[in-house]
Amino acid sequence: MSSESTAVATLRAMRWWDIEQVAVLERELFAHDPWSVEQFWGELARVPESRWFAVHEDSLGVDGYVGLYTVAPEADVQTIAVAPRSQGRGLGQLLLDALVAEARRRDCAQLFLEVRVDNAPAIALYERNGFTREGRRTDYYGAGLDALVMRRRLRDDPGVEQS
């Protein structure tokens, strides 16, 4: 069995009991500005109306998670994270694919995200997946930590500006 098919089998909706593991991973991966436990609780409180969150597990527990915010026809990547132990194995792609599929299921025409300008692996993943650079937000993640704004069109729609 391929690692991708194993990954698919362990991707599931995030639940309240995942928050502690997710918060630990959040602090490890985003030490400059991690979401708090309370922020995750707040996001899950909005599922399924305008939010969608999923986790991926390996034998050690949660090793990735993803979050989406939607107000059709637009969607925003709230978060996507992969534990260091699982990086470089295609899990980021799996999480992004699931998020895009959910945005399409919710009839969104375009998907936006912010990513730190110095996060080359994430930017490369997004560009490989049809995201284009749309702008920059100065100090978005704190002093001197700018964000690159990226967008991906999900369907042809006359109301969605071509990039």
Image (cartoon, rainbow, N blue to C red):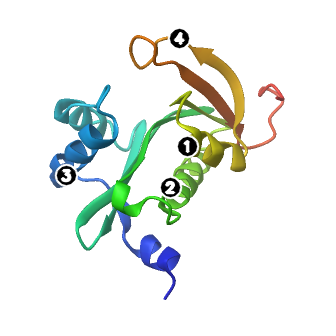
Q: Residue at x 31, y 66 (%)?
A: 57
| SS class, disc 2 | helix
Cα–Cα gap, marks 3 and 4: 31 Å
From this view, report whether residue 135 is shown above or below residue 6. Answer: above
| SS class, disc 3 | helix
Q: Are marks 3 and 1 in contact (CB under 8 Å)?
A: no
Nearer the observer: mark 3 or 1; the answer is 1
Cα–Cα gap, marks 1 and 2: 8 Å
From this view, report whether residue 45 is shown above or below residue 145. Answer: below
Residue 29: image x %, image y %?
A: 33, 41
Residue for badge 3: 21
Residue 151: image x %, image y %?
A: 67, 32
Residue for badge 4: 138
Say what amino acid the circle numbered 3 marks: Gln
Q: Which mark is residue 122?
A: 1
Q: Which mark is residue 92?
A: 2
Q: Nearer the viewer, residue 32 or 7?
A: 32
Say what amino acid the circle numbered 4 marks: Thr
Q: Are marks 2 and 3 in contact (CB under 8 Å)?
A: no
Cα–Cα gap, marks 1 and 4: 18 Å
Q: Residue at x 56, y 34 (%)?
A: 75
Q: Are marks 3 and 4 in contact (CB under 8 Å)?
A: no
Q: Are marks 1 and 2 in contact (CB under 8 Å)?
A: yes
| SS class, disc 4 | loop
| SS class, disc 1 | helix
Q: Nearer the viewer, residue 68 or 157?
A: 68
